[in-house]
Amino acid sequence: MEIISVGSSSSGNAYIIKADGHVLILDVGLTARSINEALAELGVKPEDVDAVLITHEHADHVKSIRAVARKCSNATVFASRGTILHAPAFSHVEESRICPVGEGEIIEIEGLTISTFPLSHDAAEPLGFAVESGGEKLAVVTDTGIITDEIYEAIRDADMLVFESNHDVDMLLFGEYPYPLKVRIKSDLGHLSNDYAAEVLTRILAERESDSPLRIMLAHLSFHNNMPLFARQTIEDALVAAGFHRGTDYLLEVAAREGLTSMPVLREE
């Protein structure tokens, strides 16, 4: 199983997941053209996409749903009822192709098991997704202000983890954003900071039972309030301070704002 970020930031997000002969798209917050070009670069025909998974109704996650659903003509679109009701573009997707899902539901697609869990974000009914195939588990967690017990239980045993590291706290506090927006981002319904992400990832590694390294992709970095170097360094400093070693305990990559980024690959012994 592999996941490729097509682009990830506060401006737009989309991921392509390939597993057991299936292709999924998670979020479509970039232009349809960029998503289609990414599929072509990965050797995937749009009609071969099995499902489109939408986390919530904010434009940086759903804005191209109309065009992507039309192009990926065989894909079922999965989203919460809240997302479907609050994203106007869903009115342009064939109702027969939309499958509402709730938190804790399981989606089965011929060898794939996709589970959902609630996020803590200022959206109608935001969902995170975890995909299991061939003994591997991938979880995607962005757009959440905190990691609740429910989220933690859903992701703690993941082999691959796309994890939000949205902002550097000092950059946010002393930056140009208006005060109400700063409060919103830092709230429990906002976004995870680099420091918060570091704490959670340290806990996951401390409780991890697998012998294989945890493969991590930091995602949804703010263009104005973060830098890839800051996110990476904050996470790595915390993991190293806790006694973990890159390559042995974890592998780390930062999703680019634009362009394809792949999850770090395990090296064969």
Image (spheres, rainbow, N blue to C red):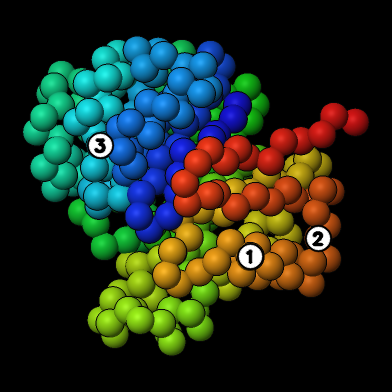
Q: Which residue in the protein does label 2 denote?
A: 244
User: Could you tell me residue 16's position as x and y percent?
Assistant: 47, 31
Q: Quadrant of the C terminus?
A: top right
**Mark 2 crowd level (few <14, some 14–19, many ≥20, 10 Å Cα):** some
User: Could you tell me residue 241's position as x and y percent?
Assistant: 79, 72
| Residue depicted at x 47% and y 46% | 258
**Circle 2: residue type:** Phe
**Circle 3: residue type:** Ser
User: Could you tell me residue 166's position as x and y percent?
Assistant: 47, 64
User: Could you tell me residue 97's position as x and y percent?
Assistant: 20, 20
Q: Is residue 159 visible?
A: yes
Residue ranking furthest to the right: 269
Considering only order in the chain, which callout, 3 or 2, is on the residue closer to the N terminus?
3
The numbered disc on residue 64 is 3
Structural distance between the alpha carbons of marks 2 and 3: 40 Å
The numbered disc on residue 36 is none
For the residue pair 196 and 32, the one nearer the viewer reads as 32
